[in-house]
Image (cartoon, rainbow, N blue to C red):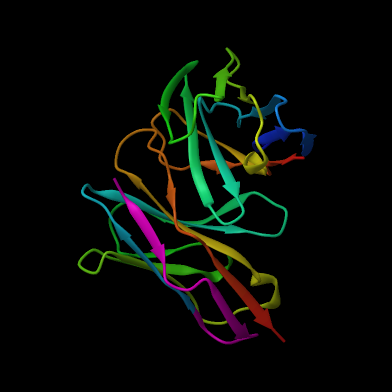
Amino acid sequence: EAGVTQSPTHLIKTRGQQATLRCSPISGHTSVYWYQQALGLGLQFLLWYDEGEERNRGNFPPRFSGRQFPNYSSELNVNALELEDSALYLCASSLWGGNEQFFGPGTRLTVL
Amino acid sequence: AQSVTQLDSQVPVFEEAPVELRCNYSSSVSVYLFWYVQYPNQGLQLLLKYLSGSTLVKGINGFEAEFNKSQTSFHLRKPSVHISDTAEYFCAVSEETSGSRLTFGEGTQLTVNP
């Protein structure tokens, strides 16, 4: 069974640009979570999507947004990139109502 | 709101020695507890979880953890570590509700020396 996949593996952008990160959950999982792992800030919850709807949001500005598609895959969009957005972005998925989240390998975003 | 404190940022040990990584949490509601491991340049892998029942939880790779409600702790232990256990370990909690976010501790870097 394939795990959670994320693309791209690495992404390099310049300040002010937009970044789009993608995540495909484990087959059968409907919930997708996004986390940011920035140096010195630890792992922070960003967003939770289920059944195409945003269900919960962490303490991040509106320029962090996303969506979930009918096949339950998800995109995370970061607009107006700032240097401090450089981080590893991890996607996780779970069954609906599930309490165990399975993580993908992450996308390393570097903002120059 | 909940919070997680991992009491040691770095733990160096020798191979075949026992190890304990400490985790304390704070929450106003009942929680589920997790330990994840992260190898360099990889995502997170679940080591073990406490949802209910027995307070001693066994996980993968010989790790175990004990939930202590009175001390709000969930310490991770392994009786004999290997070089391959070198990694960063994260303690996490979530509320006992569907789809709840995970709140992570700051992580503990375990380094196993020969």
Q: Which residue corresponds to the image point at 50% horizontal and 15% vertical from the top-left?
A: A52
Query: Does A61 sit above or below residue B93?
Result: above
Residue drawn at (47%, 31%), measured in percent from left and top?
A95
Q: Nearer the viewer, residue A12 or A43?
A: A12
For residue A35, which quarter of the picture?
top right
| Residue B78 position in % (x across, y down) | 51, 76
Residue stretch rendered in magenta on the structure: B1-19
Query: Which residue is at 30% across, 64% downward?
Result: B55
Q: Is residue B95 left or right of residue B80?
A: left
Which of B44 and A30 lies nearest the eye of the viewer?
B44
Nearest the eye: B109 or B36: B109
Residue B93 on the magenta span: no
Residue nearer the viewer, A81 or A58: A81
User: In the rendered image, which quarter is residue A104 located in?
Assistant: top right
Rendered location of residue B75, percent (x, y): 40, 70
**Image quadrant containing the C terminus of chain A:** top right
**Rendered view: A49 above or below B74:** above
Q: Is residue B15 magenta?
A: yes
Vertical arrangement, residue A37 with respect to residue B106, above or below: above
Q: Is residue A88 visible?
A: no
Question: Position of A101 compared to B15: left or right?
Answer: left
Q: Position of residue A83 (x, y in %)?
A: 67, 41
Quadrant where the N terminus of chain A is found in the figure: top right
Please determine whether, in this image, residue A95 is positioned above or below residue B86. Answer: above
